[in-house]
Image (spheres, rainbow, N blue to C red):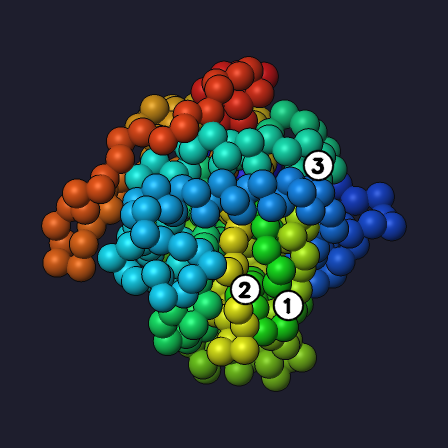
Amino acid sequence: MPSANPPSASVKETSSFQIQNPGGDWRDELEKKGYCVVKGVLTPERAKYYQDQAFAWLKSFDASLDLDDPSTWAKANLPLQTDKNTYEHYSVVHEKFMWEARQEPKVLEAFAKLWGTDELIVSFDSLNVTLPNLKEARAPWPHVDQAPRKRGLHCIQGIINLSKAGPEDGSLCVMDGSSALVETFFDEKTDPADWEMRDNRYFDDKDMQWFKERGVTPVRVQADPGDLILWDSRCIHWGGEPTPKSNVIRTVIYAAYAPAALASPAALAEKQRVFASNGATTHWPHTNIKLRDLQARLPDGTADPRHRTEPLEKAEQTDQLLKLAGVKAY
């Protein structure tokens, strides 16, 4: 379990937590490769429901937007995205459909199997809707979401996949097998004095060559609507842009879960503050709780006048939701 006291940047913070894996299912692949696809956690009908809800949310900003008509996909018709194609402003993180997806039984079941408990808390993570051929594809930005000082298993990230992710479509890209080597890379190729106290580290071409020389290869994860994509935060990854051959609107909800027992009182207090403000956090559910900027900003830095302080459709604050949010104790 992670250390209770934050160490200095050069001190390793070791976790003894392990994936709960008796063998014989998708957890084998997750441990071996650092990522896996859990098939069919949602029915195709449920996946379409969530995608339709995401599209309706997009269209709430401009009635002229038609997701079936690319001629209407002008930037002015869309809410502001991050440069990674995600939506995290306008209180979208706490829309009813986002919380419904986070509470899907088979999504929860998968993470309960991983951690060996159903007493889970969830990240307040973003929505991704990537319109194909709308702009020049962004170059890969390989990174891990776990600080070099952290050793062992600390976080498993998740994508609730709502659209087809084929070889030409937008999807998660990973360096297959990198999670088993990344700690060796940090020890051999980086200076511990430079390890920042944040759960994020990017890799340049020279870094990537080190992994490729050890047999680590890039993979675009393929998945169907309703699948759950999981990966270890030590696995090098990035959001793969659709190729010009794709006409699929990539639609995914990011959601990571961890045992509530791993969260410190301070982390829970901050999580509750973010929840009360309808804010978004990092990928981490139980630590590294940081409120992302609530205000969407135009390119000139001014506030988007379409700013929303609360969801269009609020989720019912059930016991399950409040426990997953870290607001109510198990």
Name the spot of residue 32 as percent of width and height, x first.
74, 61
Q: Nearer the viewer, residue 158 or 308?
A: 308
| Quarter of the figure with the N terminus | top right
Instruction: Tell me, yes or no, whether the two marked residues, 2 and 1, touch with CB atoms within 8 Å.
Output: yes
Q: Earlier in the sequence, mark 3 or mark 1?
A: 3
Instruction: Give above or below for 151 relative to 122.
Output: below
**Circle 2: residue type:** Val
Q: CA distance from mark 2 to mark 3?
A: 25 Å
| Label 1: which secondary element | loop
Instruction: Give above or below for 155 relative to 309.
Output: below
Q: State the residue at coordinates (83%, 50%).
A: 25
Q: In this figure, which residue is indicated by the disc labeled 2?
A: 248
Q: CA distance from mark 2 to mark 1?
A: 9 Å
Which of label 2 and label 3 is nearer to you?
Answer: 2
Which of label 3 and label 1 is nearer to you?
Answer: 1
Name the spot of residue 56 as percent of width and height, x first.
43, 43
The quadrant in which residue 84 appears is bottom left
**Circle 3: residue type:** Lys
Which residue lies most toward the right here? Answer: 24
Image position of 42 (left or right of 198): right
Q: In this figure, which residue is indicated by the disc labeled 1?
A: 166
Image position of 112 (left or right of 256): right
Image position of 232 (left or right of 207): right
Instruction: Tell me, yes or no, whether the two marked residues, 3 and 1, touch with CB atoms within 8 Å.
Output: no
**Mark 3 packing: few (<14 Cα in 10 Å), some, or many (20+)?**
some
Q: Earlier in the sequence, mark 2 or mark 3?
A: 3
Q: State the residue at coordinates (29%, 54%).
A: 77
From this viewpoint, is residue 62 visible? Answer: yes
**Mark 1 packing: few (<14 Cα in 10 Å), some, or many (20+)?**
some
Q: CA distance from mark 3 to mark 1?
A: 23 Å
Name the spot of residue 75 as percent of width and height, x first.
28, 60
Q: In this figure, which residue is indicated by the disc labeled 3?
A: 106
